[in-house]
Image (cartoon, coloured by chain):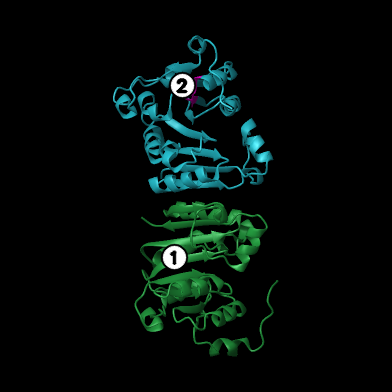
Chain colours: A cyan, B green
C-alpha cells in the first residue's frame, strides 16, 4: 500500500536535524554531478569514523539497528521517498551516528566524495520485475559505476533480497563489472550467517517459507 | 544406494569401443600430468568438431541427450566409477560423437591437451557437504585451475545442481578465481531457460519442490 503524502511534509522534513535535503533541480544526474556539493562527513558526524552507506533505507529499521550495534561506524542512509524517510529520521533521532539524505541513488556522485565510503548496503531494493525497467534496479551497471567511484579500495557491497530475479541480476551484473562475490547465501535463514538484522519485511517474507538471498561483493 | 560391483566388470569395460581406460597408476595427479598421454580428438572422433567435456557424467543420461541433439559437437564424458561408466557407455553405443574416459577429474591434465576443450559441464556433482571434504567439490580452486588449463579462450563452464551449499561454494570459488558469471538461475524450472535436459535425478528432485540451480562461467 502506497503511503499518503503526509500533511505539512515539507515543514516536517525541514525541522529534522538528521536529514540532508538533497533533491537536485537538475534532472540529468550526470550533469548534477558536475557541480558537486560534497557532504563533509567529519563535520556531519563530528569524527572520522568509517562511513557505511545504505541505499534505499526505507523506514530505517535496518540502519537504526546497525547503528545502535555499531556506535563507532557512521551511517548515511539514502531514500528518495519523502514520506518514508520522515519515518526513518524519526526512528533514528537519538542516534548520533546516523544521518539521512533524501535523494535517488543516481544523484550520489553529487553529494558523496569519491573514495569515501567503507561499505554499501542494499536491502530489499525494489526489484523492478519488468525487463524494460531493469535499469532502475540498484545493481544495474550505471549504479555499480557510481558505487565504484564513491567506495574506498576494498570496500564491500552487502546485498539482501527476497527477489530471486533481482538476485540473479545482481550476481550477473556485479560479476560482469568485475566484482568478486563472497559469502553467498541462497537461503539466509537456513545458513550459518551470524548477526543478521531481520527487518519486519524480511521476517514476514521468510515466514511464508521463501528464501532470503544475500551476497557480499568487492573489487580486487 | 551404492551399486554392487558388476561381475566380470573389467572384461566388460575392455570390450567397450567408446571407453578410454585411463586410470593412472600414479597416485599424485600432479606427477601424473608430467607424463601426459593426450587423447588425439581428431583421431578419436574422426573430425575436428569442438569438444565439450562433462566431468562426472554418471550413467550418461545428460550426455546421451546432448550428443543426439548436437551431432556436430563431440562429447568426452568423464566418470571415475567403473560400474556407473559401464552403464553410460552402453547408453551411448550408437552415438559416434560421444566417448568416455574413466578417470577422476584430478587426472584430466594427463589426458587432455591444454586449450582443447570448448565447454565443460558439471551436472549434479557430489556436493561433499562436510567442510573437511570441500576440496573434493568439482568447483574447488585446484579443479578450476585444471579446467582453466584445458579450456579454450572464452570457453564456458555450465553447472547445474540441486545442492544449495555446493552452488554457493561454486559462485564464490569461480568468482574468486576470476570467472565471470552469467545466466544464473536460482530456480531453473521456474526460469525462462530453454533447452534444459532434465535427467531422472533432476526430475525427481525438482518434483519434491526443491529448486535446481544453474550457472555459466567464463574467463574474460
Mark-to-mark CA distance, 1 and 2: 48 Å
Q: Chain of mark 1?
A: B
Q: Chain of mark 2?
A: A
Q: Position of residue A39 (x, y in %)?
A: 40, 20
Residue A97 visible here: no
Residue in front for this viewpoint, B206 or A108? B206
Residue in front for this viewpoint, A100 or A23? A23
Q: Residues within 10 Å of mark 1 (few under 14, many from 20)?
A: many
Q: Is residue B196 magenta?
A: no
In screen coordinates, is B209 left or right of B123? Answer: right
Quarter of the figure that contains the C terminus of chain B: bottom left
Residue in front for this viewpoint, A101 or B82? A101
Residue A184 visible here: yes
Q: Which residues are magenta?
A: A76-82
SS state under label 1: helix
Q: Position of residue B72 (x, y in %)?
A: 39, 74
Which mark, by number, is residue A102?
2
SS state under label 2: strand
Which mark, by number, is residue A109?
none
Question: What residue sits 50% from the left and 47% below the top?
Answer: A168
Q: Mark 1 or 2, which is nearer the eye?
A: 2
Question: What residue sits 48% from the left and 19% below the top?
Answer: A45
Q: Position of residue A207 (x, y in %)?
A: 69, 39
Quarter of the figure that contains the N terminus of chain B: bottom right
In screen coordinates, is B57 left or right of B97? Answer: right
Q: Which residue is mark 1?
A: B147
Question: What residue sits 44% from the left and 65% below the top?
Answer: B147
Amino acid at each position: 500500500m502506497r503511503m499518503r503524502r503526509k500533511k505539512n511534509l515539507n515543514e516536517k522534513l525541514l525541522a529534522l536535524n538528521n536529514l540532508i535535503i538533497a533533491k537536485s533541480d537538475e534532472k540529468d544526474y550526470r550533469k548534477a554531478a558536475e557541480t558537486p556539493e560534497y557532504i563533509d562527513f567529519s563535520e556531519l558526524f563530528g569524527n572520522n569514523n568509517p562511513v557505511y552507506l545504505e541505499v534505499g533505507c526505507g523506514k530505517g529499521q535496518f540502519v537504526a539497528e546497525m547503528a545502535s550495534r555499531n556506535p563507532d561506524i557512521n551511517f548515511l542512509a539514502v531514500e528518495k521517498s519523502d514520506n518514508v524517510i520522515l519515518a526513518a529520521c524519526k526512528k533514528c533521532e537519538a542516534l548520533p551516528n546516523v544521518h539521512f539524505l533524501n535523494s535517488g541513488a543516481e544523484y550520489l556522485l553529487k553529494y558523496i566524495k569519491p573514495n569515501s565510503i567503507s561499505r554499501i548496503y542494499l536491502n530489499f531494493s525494489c526489484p523492478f520485475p519488468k525487463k524494460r525497467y531493469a535499469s532502475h534496479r540498484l545493481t544495474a551497471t550505471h549504479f555499480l559505476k557510481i558505487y565504484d567511484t564513491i567506495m574506498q579500495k576494498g570496500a564491500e557491497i552487502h546485498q539482501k533480497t527476497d527477489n530471486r530475479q533481482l538476485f540473479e541480476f545482481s550476481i550477473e551484473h556485479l560479476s560482469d563489472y568485475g566484482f568478486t562475490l563472497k559469502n553467498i547465501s541462497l537461503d539466509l535463514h537456513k545458513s550459518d550467517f551470524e548477526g543478521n538484522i531481520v527487518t519486519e519485511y524480511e521476517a514476514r517474507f521468510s515466514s511464508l517459507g521463501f528464501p532470503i538471498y544475500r551476497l557480499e561483493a568487492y573489487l580486487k
